[in-house]
Image (cartoon, rainbow, N blue to C red):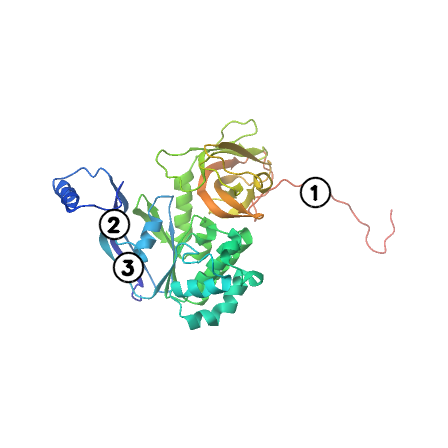
Amino acid sequence: MSRPIIEVRGISKRYQLGRIGFTSLREEISRLWSGARGANGAGEFWALRDVSFEVQPGEVLGLIGRNGAGKSTLLKILSEITEPTSGEVHLRGHVASLLEVGTGFHPELSGRENIFLNGVTLGMRRAEVARKFDEIVAFADIERFLDTPVKRYSSGMYVRLAFAVAAHLEPEILLVDEVLAVGDHAFQQKCLGKMQDVARQEGRTVLFVSHNMAAVNRLCDRAVHLIDGRVDAVGPAREIVAAYMEQNTAARSEWLRPAGLPVRGQVAFLRGAVRDSAGGGAAVLPYSDPFSVELECAEQSSAVVPWVLRISIYDSFGYELFSTHDTEGGATRLPRAGGRLRAACKFPGGLLKPGIYFVGVSACELAGDAPVVLYEEHEPLLSFEISAQGYVGQSGRGLLGPQSTWTFEHLALAGSQPA
């Protein structure tokens, strides 16, 4: 076997809660003295604890885990944005990071100028940007607005251009943090296709962080599951994803926001529940009965941009079967400081085959008719089971099992006379 292109050995990262830095030598000495005397660690937070794994050249490795598991912290260490508290990393190749698309864009410059500025900022030579310029513009689909200052771009246009520039880098190692959470569905599929080209056709090594389990299954050879900053499991992507889905949402038809879960956007989820046809909570639903997903949200501050909710239904392997946005209702909805919203989305009976399913949710800013800027996301949030009660279909191929009605009509053979 060839030498690993990425080696992570015993990486740990500790943060001091409530501190940005130490303001005096006295304070620093006091902190070190307290630690030497066996302080109980109050005020400390370990984002990572003794994380170790290897990545081979040309491999695509997925990093999965719930919010706060340490995924982004690990990528920042690999990107040399922050240093580990202990442990070591060996990278045998040039590294490029897609940790936050659009970093380095200047609002007063045009799209054309920002392509060159951002490309050089991300490590490309000017000649390389010029060579790929037409390809970047075509991918972003912004030809008409190329010479318009990006401050006048919609959120969707901004994201498309930012990803187009970043996706055309040519490093040996590419670190990707949840870039598929932005843009509309068509653009997400386009991004996913580009990531596949980078990994499969161009032979790059990719470390891919995502809450989209179907994307992890589709892109990745292996996956690492992080829980509370520690490695829980490493193995084939499909096996790790299946175990993750089962561990994190088994029999959880109701959800209440944990105390201390940070709020990072204008909208935060407070509660979630799967309801049966009578409105009660239910972990198991008959195949033929309708059901609904109920959500309660808190609006953190007032804004001038409408926002919408998304609900997606996934199968037990993490594949998204379908999703729905409340685009029509959210087109005029603006966040109100301290406001609360309860929403329910109803689904018909006779749609899902008997089995285990998962519910993912997000709250997004609405730009035009497409949800773009993500406020908060939980993938997955809830789970439920569809029982075989009322199901008369065959257990053949296909992901869905909708009820259907057949009609038959016997036709006379050509040239024959009716009886």
Tell me the CA gap for discs 2 and 1.
61 Å
Residue 389 seen from this side = no
Q: What mark, if any, has residue 224 been given in the picture?
A: none
Query: x and y percent of residue 380 in the render?
Result: 45, 42
Residue at (45, 66) in percent of width and height: 116
Say what secondary structure mark 2 lies in: strand
Amino acid at dot 3: Glu
- First along the sequence among labels 3 and 1: 3
Q: Which residue is mark 3?
A: 7
Residue 112 seen from this side = yes
- First along the sequence among labels 2 and 1: 2
Q: Does 204 sit left or right of 386 as displayed?
A: left
195 and 159: which one is in front? Answer: 159
Q: Which residue is mark 1?
A: 406
Query: x and y percent of residue 131 in the render?
Result: 47, 72
- First along the sequence among labels 2 and 3: 3
364 and 157: which one is in front? Answer: 157
Q: Does 53 sit left or right of 136 as displayed?
A: left
Q: What mark, if any, has residue 12 been given in the picture?
A: 2
Tell me the CA gap for discs 2 and 3.
14 Å
Quadrant placement of the N terminus: bottom left
- Mark 2 nearby-residue class (10 Å; few <14, some 14–19, many ≥20): many
Query: x and y percent of residue 201 in the render?
Result: 46, 67
Q: Are marks 2 and 1 in contact (CB under 8 Å)?
A: no
Amino acid at dot 1: Trp
Q: Does 47 sit left or right of 386 as displayed?
A: left
Amino acid at dot 2: Ser
Query: x and y percent of residue 148 in the render?
Result: 53, 60
Tell me the CA gap for discs 3 and 1.
58 Å
